[in-house]
Amino acid sequence: MRKTFVVAFVALLVAGVGGYLGFTAFVAHLARSHVDAVLANLKAGGVDAQAGTVSYDVIAGRFELHDLSLSAPGQGTLKIASFVADGVERPSPTRIFAHDVAIEGIAFDGPLPLAPAVEASYRAPRIELAAVEIPATEPAPGTPWQVAMDVFEKVTTDRVSIPGSTVRTTSGTGDQRIETEVMHGAATFEMLKDGRFARASVAPSRFTVGGAPRYAGSGSVGDILAEEVDLSALLILLDPERREAATQFRTLYGAVTVAGYDIAAGDGLKQSWERLELRDVAIRPSAIPAEELFALGRQMQALAARGEKLPPADAARLMEALASIYDGGLRVGSATFEGLRGAMPDGGTATLATLKAGPFDEGRLDTLTLEKLKGTEPGGAPFRLDRLAVGGLRPGAALTLAAQITHEPDALLEWPASLFGLVGTIELDGAEGPTGSGEPVSIDRLALSWTGEPDALPTRLSASLRMTGPTGAVDPNQSAFALVPGQVGRASIAADIGAAWNEAAGTATLDPFYVEVSDAFSVTAKLSLSEVDDSVFSTEPDEAMAGIGHVNLAGLDITVTDSGLYQEKLDDAAKEQGMSADDIRQLIAGFADLLLAQAVTDRPELGPAVQAFVDFVQHPGSTLALRITPRAGPLPMLAIVEALTGADALGIVDELNVEVIGKN
């Protein structure tokens, strides 16, 4: 009984409390000889283990162990001044019970188990356990972590209390060095069974950040409450065999709430949240490449000590490893952040009512929503955003793409379809912000969505925009300036675009296509394509490009309405040339007539379309509506694009029929 008692209790300390603190060792055996034997076994396993006095009062049911020290290469050193258990009894042949356990003088120094690139120092004056029950049999042999987890998952306790503790960490060197100190409030863990705590709480804590001057700051964290806390799910990551066998999701936290958080940096940055909440956080250990991440962490630590960074190839490996966690190793029911307030060093301010995210599963975040963001820019100009919602966000895919670009810098330029796999929808409502002209730009609504296979062109796409803004905000040197009505101070823009693939018919349609600029113009169009098979939407770039090469034009209907822009540009040209606007208009119409005359001579059927175009040029404020179809046989879209971008753009007219479908 004595031997098993110490094994189980110290394993509980290291695995249960140590899961919270980050320790990596255990001690066993009640009698001095038994303790020495266990320490010898630990030494044989590469652990430097030492212990002071050991005593056990059978009558009083009191066990004491003093001056315990455990140290393992690459895992740090754990020291315990005293370990005292009272009320020890044996309620059954297979279990041992202790009413109270007190552990004093806990000190740990070394790398964090799950972040080996971070050196940590932990101090806790006292840890108390109540109503502890442990197995009477010895744990199975193995590494310290394996033994600790084996015992931890078989121990029960009503409560673990840590009245106060301090954690200090350091990472990086030089201007990348970060030092933190966290002074935890009283922590309590309740009802441990099967490696899970039913509830946990941490009283308000304070922290400071130092190291490089740019990281300096301090802050606090409010009360933390958690339910269904499974520490063993995290500890499994330290055991390669059990990690690979754990193919099902394990819930780390059923729910976690934080009653406020604030930080103030030395450079003037301030940020605070009123409330944070996470629900249903789970991991699938087998999908987390823990050994590779630990190895990269140690490599980063060694490089940082020399003032170096990870080579690009290893940085890509790190991104790919993190991507695998997002894609198959992490699941989150929901995350909610409420009541953000922030101030920037340059004088800008911001508040945010809520940030909500979730659910996140199989690498996809269903929705990320920001509501009621508002603030001021450094100069005092206000901005606001009523709502922003992003759907189908795939952070793992973004990391994978970043890793690919590390290997192939031009990969995205050669095949940008990968971008469509990073997000599925974007919706923005009620946004307003300052411009260089001093007048605000307002977006009533922006909506984008698409569907399709990741890394492929979307099979369905839609976009909608409603916005207004100052015309003076457009740079006169930009080509877009030609489409801006300068006679008004503000203009409205409306746009609706939709495209879809009909797999059964082998067609694709761009409909609607509608763009309107107030007091300027509007354009509506419908584009129909044929010979569009599934190869166009392949995830293989070569196959997709081959499929695109077979896509043909079926027809294009386009309608252009002048709403004042043409007359304005005529007036501007007249002033520059010292001519009347009517003379400028007639000159343009005559040039168009001359340019297209040969086409009419060769193909008289184009006469009505050419005349409609000339009439449109001659009459500002009119409408031109045309239908364009292939003249004979299939007409590949790539051929049209090549012609329009070539030296003889009008040569493509020989391949087209052009009809008038409306009147001026």
Image: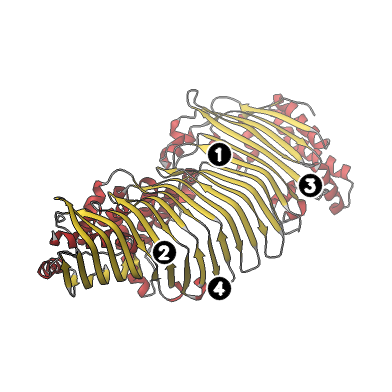
Q: Are marks 3 and 2 in contact (CB under 8 Å)?
A: no
Residue beneath disc 2: 186
Q: Earlier in the sequence, mark 2 or mark 4?
A: 2
Q: Nearer the viewer, mark 3 or mark 4?
A: 4
Q: Which residue is mark 4?
A: 266
Q: Earlier in the sequence, mark 3 or mark 2?
A: 2
Amino acid type assigned to the residue bearing label 1 in the image? Ser
Labels 3 and 4: the sequence-earlier one? 4
Q: Amino acid at mark 4?
A: Gly
Percent position of residue 97, x then y = 22, 56
Viewer-nearest residue: 123 or 86: 86
Which residue corresponds to mark 3?
485
- In primary-sequence order, the first of circles 1 and 3 is 1
Q: Quadrant of the C terminus?
A: top right
Label 3 environment density (alpha carbons within 10 Å; few <14, some 14–19, many ≥20): many
Q: Relative to 111, say whether 334 is above or below.
A: above
C-alpha gap between disc 1 and disc 3:
30 Å
Q: Answer left or right for 214 relative to 307.
A: right
Give above or below for 569 relative to 42. above
- Label 1 vs label 3, nearer the camera: 1
Left or right: where 19 falls relative to 334: left
> Which mark's residue is nearer the viewer, 3 or 2?
2
Cα separation, mark 1 vs mark 4, equals: 42 Å
| Residue 449 circle label | 1
Mark with earlier residue (1, 2)? 2
Q: Amino acid at mark 3?
A: Pro
Mark 4 lies on a secondary structure that is: loop
